[in-house]
């Protein structure tokens, strides 16, 4: 069986890890907005993770994981030089702008709003635009400074980088929605499109804010995915009153048309099962 080597592991923030995986075939085909399915071993759960970066020349793909459930804890317990059983992808549809000409990209201005771990999948999108002459302002939001990730990397590819922390420990004090208003109302900024990736509740309020300015907004609903193929049906989402599957029709959708309340209810459906899995994982670890 072919195995995938972890060539780099870094702790980015509390319980948030970067893993760079040797996966040449995935790296060759990867585009911004897509995801991979990771399985630690033959008995492991399928975990869909959005691609945080890729290097076609080196044949590596970067993923960023927050250790929340049993499977992510097991994955992040591995170290450099260890192997994982499966690393399938790239899956899902890439971001819409990859189909645009460089001339069209240069004529548009983007605003990216990244929340928490959602900062990682924002990075390859901003990087791609930068490489094709596009201009993108980026807002990175976190509860506090210690939870910020990818700020140095983002600063190199963003036209302007703004950081917002809830407690004011770094950058702008307040929510990302307040920073959006500040940029448009007080700094006179204007944008052709907003892209928001982060916690579901954050994306909901970002879309409510951008709707006030008639600013088209794209969101990524990757957090809804379970098996990553559409077969389980767990990632169903209502967009403009129609049902879509996040993993095969997305993961990006028109944020102004997404039923976020339904999506958040769906996201909470498996909370008990996730809790039970963590208990089993912790019990197994304590037995050694």
Image: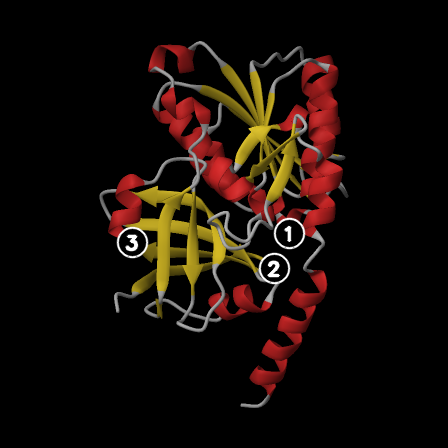
Q: Which residue is denoted by mark 2 in the rendering? A: 14
Outermost residue, left direction? Answer: 57
Residue 261 vs residue 68: left or right? right
Q: Could you say which quadrant of the image residue 22 lies in?
A: bottom left
Q: In front: 231, or 149?
A: 231
SS for callout 3: loop
Outermost residue, bottom direction? Answer: 288
Q: 62 above or below 215?
A: below
Give the CA distance from mark 2 to mark 1: 8 Å
Q: Could you say which quadrant of the image residue 97 lies in?
A: top left
- Give percent across and percent down for residue 145: 66, 47
Mark 3 or mark 1, which is nearer the start of the sequence? 3
Counting every numbered tag in the picture gives: 3
Closer to the eye: label 2 or 1: 2
- Give percent across and percent down for residue 177: 73, 29
Q: In the rendered image, is residue 94 in sight?
A: yes
Q: Are marks 2 and 3 in contact (CB under 8 Å)?
A: no
| Mark 3 nearby-residue class (10 Å; few <14, some 14–19, many ≥20) | many
Q: Which residue is denoted by mark 1 in the rendering? A: 146
Q: Which residue is denoted by mark 3 in the rendering? A: 23
Q: 70 above or below 110?
A: below
Q: Are marks 2 and 1 in contact (CB under 8 Å)?
A: yes
SS for callout 1: helix
- Give percent across and percent down for residue 74: 51, 70
Residue at position x 69%, y 24% in the image: 180
| Mark 2 nearby-residue class (10 Å; few <14, some 14–19, many ≥20) | few
Mark 3 or mark 2, which is nearer the start of the sequence? 2
């Amino acid at each position: 069986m072919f195995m995938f080597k972890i060539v780099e592991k870094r702790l980015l923030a509390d319980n948030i890890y970067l893993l760079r995986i040797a996966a040449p075939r995935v790296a060759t085909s990867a585009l911004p907005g897509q995801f991979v399915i990771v399985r630690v071993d033959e008995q492991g759960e399928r975990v869909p993770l959005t691609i945080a970066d890729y290097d076609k020349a080196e044949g590596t793909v970067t993923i960023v994981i927050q250790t929340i459930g049993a499977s992510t804890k097991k994955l992040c317990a591995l170290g450099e030089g260890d192997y994982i059983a499966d690393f399938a992808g790239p899956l899902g549809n890439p971001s819409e702008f990859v189909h645009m000409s460089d001339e069209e990209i240069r004529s548009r201005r983007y605003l990216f709003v990244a929340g928490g771990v959602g900062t990682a999948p924002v990075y390859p999108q901003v990087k791609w635009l930068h490489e094709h002459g596009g201009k993108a302002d980026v807002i990175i939001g976190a509860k506090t400074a210690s939870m910020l990730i990818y700020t140095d990397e983002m600063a190199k590819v963003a036209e302007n980088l703004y950081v917002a922390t809830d407690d004011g420990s770094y950058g702008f004090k307040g929510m990302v929605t307040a920073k959006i208003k500040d940029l448009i109302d007080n700094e006179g900024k204007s944008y052709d499109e907003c892209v928001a990736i982060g916690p579901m509740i954050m994306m909901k309020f970002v879309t409510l804010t951008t709707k006030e300015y008639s600013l088209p907004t794209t969101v990524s609903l990757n957090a809804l995915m379970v098996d990553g193929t559409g077969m389980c049906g767990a990632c169903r989402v209502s967009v403009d009153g129609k049902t879509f599957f996040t993993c095969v029709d997305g993961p990006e959708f028109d944020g102004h048309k997404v039923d976020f309340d339904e999506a958040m209810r769906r996201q909470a459906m498996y909370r008990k099962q996730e809790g039970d899995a963590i208990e089993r994982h912790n019990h197994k670890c304590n037995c050694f």
